[in-house]
Amino acid sequence: MTRIAVRGDLLDFAADPGFLPPSEAPGVRFHPDHWLLIDSGRIAGVSASEPDESWQRIDHRGKLILPGFIDTHVHSPQLDVIASYGTELLDWLNTYTFPAELRYADPEVAAAGAERFVDALLAHGTTSAVVFPTVHKVSADALFASAERRGMRLVAGKVLMDRHAPEGLCDDVAQAERDCVDLIQRWHGRGRLAYALTVRFAPTSTPAQMDMAAALLKAHAGTYMQTHVAENRDEVRWVAELFPEARSYLDVYHRHGLLNERSVLAHGIWLDDNDRALLREVGAQIAHSPSSNLFLGSGLFDWQTAEKQGAQVTLATDVGGGTGLSMIRTLADAYKIQALQGMRLTAFKALYSATRGAAQALRLQHEIGSFDTGTTADIAVWDWSATPVMAHRIGLARDLHEKLFAWMTLGDERLLAEVHVAGVPRFRR
Ligand code: GUN
Ligand code: ZN
């Protein structure tokens, strides 16, 4: 039994701060210069005074300690195409992404890619993620194995795609079903891993493949479903041509039985009121991916309307459409997307959404996303500043929100000092 106490400025959230002004936001739990107690890999409490000798003490005085970030939508093989020039979604897939993903049929490429990816997540302060590998079963095996070795909470599944893609990226319904069943049996519920039926997006799956995925989703309790929806206007038009019977893009997934409270839908920029009502009804979440939406020119996601109408919204990097694995930069981009629409995202709401909010939307709040007693000790220790300009600005902040807002607007992974996964140090600068 190991007892660890980590000293620093502790910040987590007990409830959703919503879109209220900072001074009225509920749920903020800030304990400056306190001790976070970790017993056998779990949070055991918060203490104002130094614990006794039975605790191993780690002094991060003057640093910010947060729950590890949760990235709800990211593609592990796409570190190979991040920052590729000049295209919108459909051309970007065909020009850069599909050719890059073809290489992951090779077990060595898949294994090396998975290791590189999970280490990169940790080096950005992200301790949990919902991930797309590639269509190749070996890429899912490699990803689960890499996460397991580091004790990380990971939700993932082999990508399903049986049309409108290069031959080496297409499966077929029968083989895909065998692969999914085998992967579910070997990985779902093992340690901190969960399986997600992973329909890439409606254009690359036949109706028969979506039906197969829905049957597995129903048959295996606790499995997730992840996909993309309503990201790009040309994509939305294409889906309307491919599925003329559906009321909307989201309705395609609904008709095929793919929506429930464990569905993670990336983007959702071009949804309408009926779609948002459907999201509320089924309890699904939108993984808002601001840097990707800006980089691929996809559009501006209306977060407040989505939430007003009952959809849960989490935050994601969507690498490699997104331009980096930093959730801090993602928060800053999210603020700018709301600002372009005349709305304001507080640092409280942004940080909540990347921690407890995501945990709640994934139905994992008993395990991750906060410093609640009994949750798994996935924590990240951050410097308050990384440059003279940042130190100057943070030093002038008059209250906690101003300080956190400057931190998230100016910061990135260079602030990261240390990461613990289930109480075990997994990254140290
Ligand atoms: N839609 C279908 N596949 C993808 C992908 O890999 N990235 C993004 N951003 N959108 C997609
Ligand atoms: Zn994506």
Image (tube, rainbow, N blue to C red):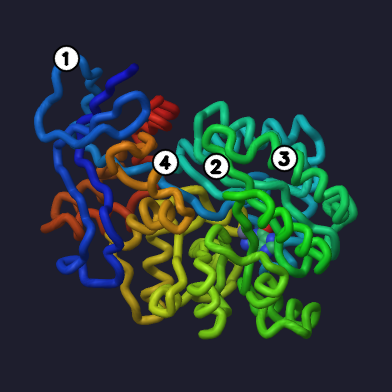
Q: Amino acid at mark 4?
A: Gly
Residue type pointed to by label 3: Leu
Mark 2 vs mark 3: give the one in front: 3
Q: Position of residue 13 (x, y in %)?
A: 27, 53
Label 4 near label 2: C-beta < 8 Å? no
| Disc 3 residue lies near ligand 1 with CB under 8 A | no
Q: Is residue 279 left or right of residue 338?
A: right
Report the residue that reaches farthest toward the right. Answer: 167
Figure quadrant of the N terminus: top left
Whether label 2 touches label 3, CB < 8 Å: no
Amino acid beneath label 2: Leu
Q: Position of residue 171 (x, y in %)?
A: 85, 52
The Cα atoms of the two marked residues, 3 and 1, are separated by: 45 Å
Mark with earlier residue (2, 4): 4
Task: Say which label, 4 or 3, has the lower sequence index.
Answer: 4
Q: Earlier in the sequence, mark 2 or mark 3?
A: 2
Element under label 4?
Answer: loop
> Quadrant location of the C terminus?
top left
State which quadrant residue 210 falls in.
Answer: bottom right
Can you identify the residue that label 1 sits on? 53
Which residue is identified by label 2?
154
Determine crowd level at label 4: few under 14, some 14-19, many 20+ residues with C-alpha closer than 10 A.
many
Q: Is mark 1 within 8 Å of ligand 2?
A: no
Kindly tell me whether residue 429 is visible in this rendering. no
Q: Which of the two residues, 99 or 356, is positioned nearer the viewer here?
A: 356
- The answer to whether 222 appears left or right of 342 in the picture is right
Choose between 30 and 46: the one closer to the eye: 46
Residue tagged 3? 183
* Image marks 3 and 1: residues in contact by CB distance under 8 Å: no
Three-letter code, disc 1: Glu
Disc number placed over residue 125 in the picture, else none: 4
Q: How far is the residue under mark 2 from the one under mark 1?
A: 34 Å
